Image (cartoon, rainbow, N blue to C red):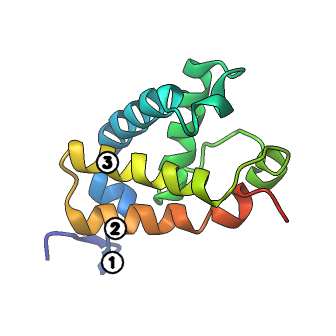
Amino acid sequence: NQNRHAIGGLNRQQNLFEKIGRPFIERAIGEFYRRAFADSIIGHFFIDKVHEDLVVQQIDFAVALLGGPQNYKGRALAPLHHGLPIRRPHFGRRQVLMGDVLDDLDLESELKRQWLELEETLRPKILKPR
């Protein structure tokens, strides 16, 4: 299997980060936020943010989420997001935008599914508690 690496004599599956690679993740996150900042449904959440700083921070977050180096230095997700009025439709829109970006960048469908599945696990940390 081309997605196996020999480490210390043992075979192990590549994680999602290794399969996708940092350059692709950087392009995908950059494009996602370019679209999100301009989006009529979720763009207002980013009005008071320094866009360049947010993108750099979110690349580190995505790399860590997908199994790469754990270099994310931002705040914990729940306290950061729970003060915002983010509801299910907002998170759904976020997932649609990310899915569109991954499609437009030609990510293999199974890798796209796995990426979005990992992001879906963040939903409880992002949505405003009831």
Q: Nearer the viewer, mark 3 or mark 2?
A: 3
Mark sitting on residue 87: none
> Does the residue at mark 1 contact the one at mark 2 (Cβ under 8 Å)?
no
Q: Position of residue 12 (x, y in %)?
A: 33, 77
Judging from the image, what secondary structure is the residue with disc 1 in? strand
Q: Position of residue 42 (x, y in %)?
A: 58, 38
- Sooner in the amino-acid sequence: mark 1 or mark 3: 1
Image quadrant containing the N terminus: bottom left
In the picture of the structure, the residue carrying the numbered disc 2 is 113
- Label 3 CA crowd tier, 10 Å (few <14, some 14–19, many 20+): some
Image quadrant containing the C terminus: bottom right
Above or below: residue 27 compared with residue 52: below
Q: Nearer the viewer, mark 1 or mark 3?
A: 3
Residue at horizontal 49 percent and vertical 34 percent from the top? 36
What amino acid type is highlighted by mark number 1?
Arg
Instruction: Using the numbered discs, state the Cα–Cα distance from disc 1 to disc 2 in whole angstroms.
Output: 21 Å
Residue at horizontal 73 percent and vertical 60 percent from the top? 125
Residue at horizontal 57 percent and vertical 46 percent from the top? 61
In the picture of the structure, the residue carrying the numbered disc 1 is 12
Where residue 87 sits, quadrant-wise, is bottom right
Judging from the image, what secondary structure is the residue with disc 3 in? helix
- In the picture provided, is 52 more to the left or to the right than 86? left
The residue furthest left is 1
Judging from the image, what secondary structure is the residue with disc 2 in? helix
Q: Nearer the viewer, mark 1 or mark 2?
A: 2
Q: Position of residue 22 (x, y in %)?
A: 36, 42
Above or below: residue 25 compared with residue 112: above
Residue at horizontal 35 percent and vertical 73 percent from the top? 8
What amino acid type is highlighted by mark number 2?
Arg
In the picture of the structure, the residue carrying the numbered disc 3 is 100
- In the picture provided, is 80 more to the left or to the right than 112? right
**Picture mark count:** 3
